[in-house]
Amino acid sequence: MRIDIITVLPEMLDGFFNCSIMSRAQKKGIAEIHIHNLRDYAYDRYRKVDDYPFGGFAGMVMKIEPIDRCISALKAERDYDEVIFTSPDGERFDQPMANSLSLAQNLIILCGHFKGIDYRIREHFITKEISIGDYVLTGGELAAAVIADAVVRIIPGVISDEQSALSDSFQDNLLAAPVYTRPAEYKGWQVPEVLLSGHEAKVKEWELQQSLERTQRLRPDLLK
């Protein structure tokens, strides 16, 4: 998979994609993450990518020309499954969407900034708008990182134990069961006996019951 991220703040993303699982996925050749500085596609020597909005509204708006130049340059080299815009009024990001996007070959993620982007970009370039929650960030870089991480980590081969990813919360519309590790007793706090029994069927039954109970208590909306 290849993910191209378009941003005005590439330094916000460099460190994130060079650590942990995201770094490992790239070193294995399973994923490619390319970060593009939108200012490199500006027309003027000041590398300006925003301007005042028509109508006298407050704030600044991302200009159409640099985004057109960047997306067009990328699409001239390969086909893309989706051109994604991170937006608070986009479709809510969830695990099923991450699963679906993980099957793509090439994705572009455009990080919003300032007061927004020229709406013609959304009309003519964007194929999917995604929100990671009902709140507003100063830019779309954190949202792009969240989307890329959730998508890449479930590609086969990225995580050494693929069963671990399949048992994550939300994969089956349930929250994950509690997990424990050594020591089995600490300050009088005991690990549930069933997990020490070695009885696989009973452990699986306990895991399902715990998932159902936690989902009903913490996120009953998932059970609908």
Image: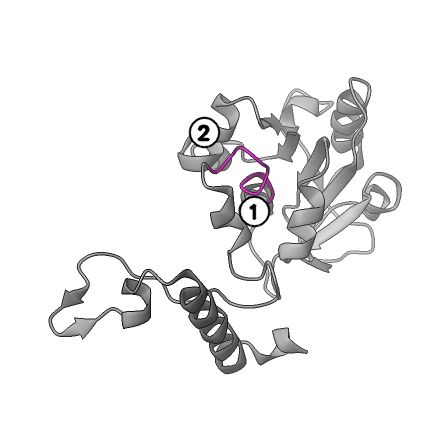
Residue 182 image offset from top left, x and y in percent: 21, 56
Do the CB atoms of the residues marked 1 and 2 lie less than 8 Å apart? no
Report the residue at 63% width, 46% height from top: 113
Q: Which mark is residue 37?
A: none
Q: Which residue is mark 1?
A: 150
Q: Is 151 left, or right, of 53 in this rendering?
A: left
Q: Position of residue 93 (x, y in %)?
A: 65, 56
Residue at 52% from the left image edge and 25% from the top image edge? 26
Residue 152: quadrant of the picture:
top right
Q: Which residue is mark 2?
A: 24
Rendered location of residue 89, percent (x, y) = 72, 60
* Label 2, residues with CA under 10 Å away: few <14, some 14-19, many ≥20: some
For the residues labelled 1 and 2, the Cα–Cα distance comes to 14 Å
| Magenta stretch encompasses residue 155 | yes
Amino acid tagged 1: Ala
Can you say which quadrant of the picture contains the N terminus?
top right
Which secondary structure is most common in the magenta stretch? Answer: loop
Q: Nearer the viewer, residue 160 or 205?
A: 205
Which residue sits at x=60%, y=43%? 151
How many discs appear?
Answer: 2
Amino acid of disc 2: Arg
Q: Point out the stretch of residues depicted in magenta.
A: 150-159
Q: Residue furthest right?
A: 124
Q: Quadrant of residue 35?
A: top right
Front in this rendered view, residue 27 or 57? 27
Q: Is residue 2 above or below residue 136?
A: above
Residue 172 sits above or below residue 64 on the image:
below
SS category of the residue bearing label 2? helix
- Percent across and percent down for residue 175 are 51, 67
Q: Residue at x 30, y 65 (%)?
A: 197
Which of the two residues, 169 or 37, is positioned nearer the viewer here?
169
